[in-house]
Image: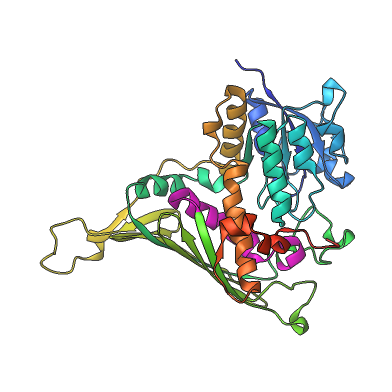
Amino acid sequence: MTTPIRVGLMGLGQRGLQHLKAVWQLQEQGLAEIVALVDAFPENLVETKIQQYVPGFKAGQIFHTTNPLEVIEAKDKAHQVDAFYVNIPPNVHKGEVVRAAKAGLHLFVEKPMSLFLDEALEMEAAIAAAGVLSTVGFQQRFDVRHEAMQQFLADKQVVMANYLLHAPIESHWVKHTPTDRVGGPANRVWTANRAWSGTTLVEAGIPPLDLWRYWLGDVVWVQATYIHRPPEEVFDGADNPYAYSVNFGFACGAVGSMILSRLRRVYHTQYEHMVLWNEGYLRFEGVEVAAYYYDGPYPPPQPPAEAEVRHGLLLAPPKNTTLEISRAFLEAIANNSPDLVRSSFSDAMNSLAAVIGANVSDELGGVRVDLADLLNAPNYARFRQRPAGL
């Protein structure tokens, strides 16, 4: 049996608690040992609070601190970790990822990794230089539906992906980070505020965009137009645009079209997701994935009925994706098997650049933005930097 991977987790908000619950389960299976917990707010480290979200949790000898450097640069062997989870809002990084990489810690970083490309590029360079393993929290790659789609599309000529999400702007408030105490939205609805979310396209668009990359490969360009919310329509810091129309170009030749909105007073969410190849399309239908194509004698003597063209994909039993992404990450460390990681930090940079590139495209009047230029060219330097005062 391998020695358990010693784990520290930073950030015990909604996602951090979900990761803690998963690693707690993996600790019970002998794969992990939780050594340290870090959160900027002491109330989030209280054992009785954590137990509300992590059944059976016992603080025991786990080190608790509000200072991540006490774990990243621990001198006391009892507090030293092998792997460090960074589960904090993307706008509040203060060099933790870089310092952890330089300390030789394997890194699990939640998405989006940052709202600022220069900051993310510095993280990527530090991870590469240190030679540590990394993963970014794109757990949807472990969903059995998405695995089945990846296998189904592997030999197909994909031509287009379509994603539509209309969600209320009042939704998805932050439950554990008191944004109202640290200069953020007073009502804690971080997804409505650009400084905290990076826009709806960054916050809500990066998961489906990363799935497209899982199925189709890398994005090479992006072009976007947003409908902006005027100042008189901004309430409680909700300054993100009304609506987004974004096109992505993939190296494989396919295009992706993403339509998003966050409107006030709607209180209803609509969702659609499709992928088209040259002779059919896939779509999500509840918990199922249906492929629509005709595989009989062609041309058919008469138009086939829907039952003849609808093919449900055979799916494996559902899995807890948050548990499985941590299992893969920790087993990759234990066995020195980086292939178990489905999205390393370096890989995830393409997803991050694509959604931030959409913001840049809109700001420049809807021009097409080449991602290689966005990440390297001098004329995009100002878009890569963290703005003064943030």
Q: Is residue 114 above or below residue 78?
A: below
Q: In the rendered view, does 216 fall on the left or right side of 374? A: left
Q: Is any atom of residue 209 visible in this view?
A: yes
Instruction: Depth check: give the residue in front, 332 or 38.
Output: 332
**Quadrant of the rendered image containing residue 263:** bottom right
Residue under the point 76% across and 33% down:
102
Instruction: Depth check: give the residue in front, 130 or 291.
Output: 130
Percent of width and height locating residue 213 = 49, 52
Q: Which residues are magenta?
A: 192-218
Q: In the rendered view, does 67 fall on the left or right side of 174? A: right
Q: Is any atom of residue 172 visible in this view?
A: no
Residue under the point 84% across and 57% down:
178
Name the outermost residue toward the top: 1
Q: Could you tell me which quadrant the C terminus lies in?
A: bottom right
> Is most of the magenta stretch helix, strand or loop?
helix
Q: Is residue 34 above or below residue 288?
A: above
Q: In the rendered view, does 204 fall on the left or right side of 81? A: left
Residue 204 is covered by the magenta coloring: yes
